[in-house]
Amino acid sequence: ELRADREHLLRKLEYKEEDVREHKRHAASARAAGDRQRQGKEGLAASTRDKVHEWISMKRALEAQVSLLQQGQRAATSELAAAQRATADARLEADFSRRRLA
């Protein structure tokens, strides 16, 4: 009877050891899956950071272009006003000359 109890306990121990090994395999698999997921998230975060920096750089470049275009527009507007004044002056002189000749 002691032998039967001993064999029963040995079998029970083997089952428990197998359960422990299975648990370790499952834990290792879960850790690996967690690591893969974390790496995926880190990769996505890095990619997103890179995109954000790229978009910020593009935004700054576009803002610089807008500034240059606005400066050019102001200069062109100033030149146009000067040309309009010169044209008005030339018309006045022409009118004055016509009246004097008439």
Image (tube, grey):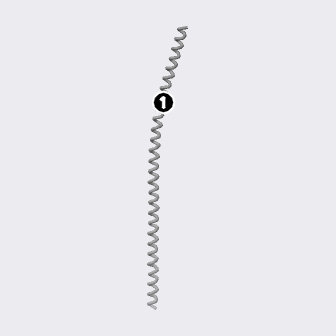
Q: Is residue 29 above or below residue 83?
A: below
The number of callouts visible is 1
Near-viewer residue (55 or 9): 55
Which element carries disc 1, helix, strand or loop?
A: helix
Looking at this view, name the residue that lies furthest to the bottom: 1
Question: Residue 68: image x %, image y %?
Answer: 45, 35
Residue in the image at 45% along x and 68% along y: 29
Nearest the viewer among 80 and 50 is: 80
Q: Is residue 102 left or right of residue 59?
A: right
Kind of residue at badge 1: Arg
Residue at 46% x, 82% y is 12
According to the image, label 1 marks what residue? 74
Residue at figure coordinates x 46%, y 91% from the top left = 1
Where does residue 73 sit, x and y in percent of width and height?
A: 49, 31
Q: Quadrant of the C terminus?
A: top right
Provide residue 91's location: percent of width, then percent of height. Answer: 53, 16
Question: Where's residue 77, x and y in %?
Answer: 49, 28
Q: Residues within 10 Å of mark 1 (few under 14, many from 20)?
A: few
Work out whether 92 lies above or below 22: above
Q: Give the residue displayed 54% in from the left and 13% down from the top.
A: 95
